[in-house]
């Protein structure tokens, strides 16, 4: 299974360690195409490269992926765009949101019939969420 993981880069990197943990847990279910999202060396300025190259590469990975898992607690235009494209392409989508963040989940994510949204408090909660999403009970 090929998994596309999405998390905020230019929208804010305060959750990069969390992303790294999530990516590690997702590795039990398949190959994560976007491991760089958890890289501590990646700043909110993003990675080197022209924007159109990054866009095209990431969409190619998203098309190739069997599913999308997105951490959506930190608002990100890019993550929202990726979720929208994955909905358009009929990909299974899991959006993860920490309610304790004090933020509200976007209605465009929470209200989408093409998106499965799950709230969690800590990464230990993700094991059951992932088992359910990936069909292991």
Image (spheres, helix red, strand yellow):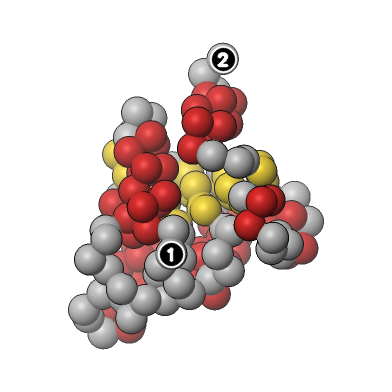
Disc number placed over residue 14 in the picture, else none: 1
Q: Residue at x 74, y 55 (%)?
A: 110
Task: Give the percent coordinates (x, y) of residue 54.
Answer: 31, 74
Q: Residue 52's image quarter?
A: bottom left
Helix, strand, or loop for circle 1? Answer: loop
Q: Secondary structure at mark 2?
A: loop
Comparing 1 with 125, the one in front is 125
The crowding category of the residue bearing disc 2, from other C-alpha atoms within 10 Å (few below 14, some 14 to 19, many at least 20), is few
Left or right, residue 33 beside residue 76: left
Closest to the observer, 70 or 89: 70
Examine the rendered structure and indicate whether residue 9 appears above or below residue 97: below
**Residue 134 located left or right of residue 44:** right
Q: Is residue 116 above or below residue 52?
A: above
| Mark whose residue sits in front, 1 or 2 | 1
Q: Is residue 3 visible to us here? A: no
Question: Residue 43 in the image: x percent, y percent?
Answer: 31, 73
User: Based on the displayed image, in which of its 4 quarters is residue 84 positioned?
Assistant: bottom right
Question: In the image, 90: left or right of 5?
Answer: right
Between 116 and 7, the one lying in front of the other is: 7
Q: Residue at x 37, y 76 (%)?
A: 44
Query: Of the residues under marks 1 and 2, which one precedes in the sequence?
Result: 1
Q: Position of residue 131 (x, y in %)?
A: 52, 24
Q: Is residue 57 visible?
A: yes
- Quadrant, the C terminus: top right
The label number, if any, that marks residue 137 in the structure image: 2
Pointer 1: residues within 10 angstroms few (<14), some, or many (20+)? some
Q: Locate residue 119 relative to residue 34 in the image: left or right.
A: right
């Amino acid at each position: 299974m090929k998994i596309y993981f999405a998390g905020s880069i230019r929208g804010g990197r305060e959750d990069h360690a969390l992303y790294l943990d999530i990516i590690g847990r997702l590795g039990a279910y398949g190959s994560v195409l976007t491991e760089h999202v958890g890289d501590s060396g990646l700043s909110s300025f993003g990675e080197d490269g022209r924007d159109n190259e990054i866009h095209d590469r990431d969409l190619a990975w998203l098309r190739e992926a069997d599913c999308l898992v997105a951490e959506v607690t930190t608002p990100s235009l890019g993550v929202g765009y990726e979720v929208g494209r994955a909905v358009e392409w009929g990909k299974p989508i899991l959006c993860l949101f920490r309610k304790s963040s004090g933020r509200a989940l976007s209605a465009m994510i929470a209200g989408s019939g093409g998106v499965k949204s799950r709230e969690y408090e800590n990464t230990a909660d993700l094991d059951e969420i992932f088992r359910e999403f990936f069909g292991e009970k």
